[in-house]
Amino acid sequence: MNSLYIYKKALADIKKAGSNNVFDIAKSKNIELIYCNEFNKLLGMYAYMLKSRIILLSNNLDEQTERIVLAHELGHDALHRKLAKNTGLKEFILYNMSSATEYEANAYASHILISDKDILELTKNGKNLIEISSILGCDINLTLIKLREMNVLGYNFKSI
């Protein structure tokens, strides 16, 4: 799956929801959100069963992590629904880069949560990676993924 395809899927979902708010996107896609107290190490899970789409989220997540995990699980819905059929896709580690599937869901999440416009404006103003992440209230790892994806799409960010 290529970066342009992932980018276009994220933008289409934002357009459909009329917002990049992950809760609005989930609602626009008719995905049921279920919060679980029983999750110890599991952050979230995407499941597709009997034509129903469900995202399970740990009740123990802070607001920022909850948004990132939800955006990641929305990525699985947009990109990997067939893989999740009947078994689900589980997240124990937020930035598991050991598989293409997990990286793709993170790339989708980066496009949902971080706008190109914000990145371009902040880099133009000389902000570094740490400053950008802080200003946007975003995890530094997700910001790195966004920058990498923007480079693949034709931008030319150096190490910042």
Image (spheres, grey):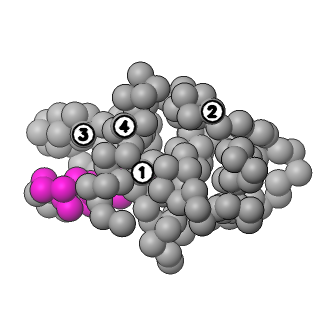
User: Is the residue under label 3 in contact with that under label 2 (CB below 8 Å)?
Assistant: no
- Please state which amino acid type lies under the numbered disc 2: Asn
Residue 61 is one of the magenta-drawn residues = no
Amino acid type, mark 3: Asp
Structural distance between the alpha carbons of marks 3 and 1: 13 Å
Query: Going from the N terminus, do you reach mark 4 or mark 2 first?
Result: 4
Query: Which residue appears at 24% of the width and 40% of the height?
Result: 116
The region drawn magenta spans 141-155
Q: Which of marks 4 and 3 is in front?
A: 4
Q: x%, y% of residue 1?
A: 36, 66
Residue furthest to the bottom in view is 98
Read off the residue under disc 2: 30
Instruction: Answer few, some or many: residues within 10 Å of disc 3's Cα (few below 14, many 20 plus, some between 14 and 19).
Output: few
The nearer-to-camera label among 3 and 1 is 1
| Earlier residue among tags 2 and 3 | 2
Q: Which of marks 1 and 4 is in front?
A: 4
Q: What residue type is labelled 1?
A: Tyr
Instruction: Please name the residue that numbered disc 4 is placed on.
Output: 12
Q: Can residue 122 be seen in this view?
A: no
- Residue 26 found in image quarter: top right
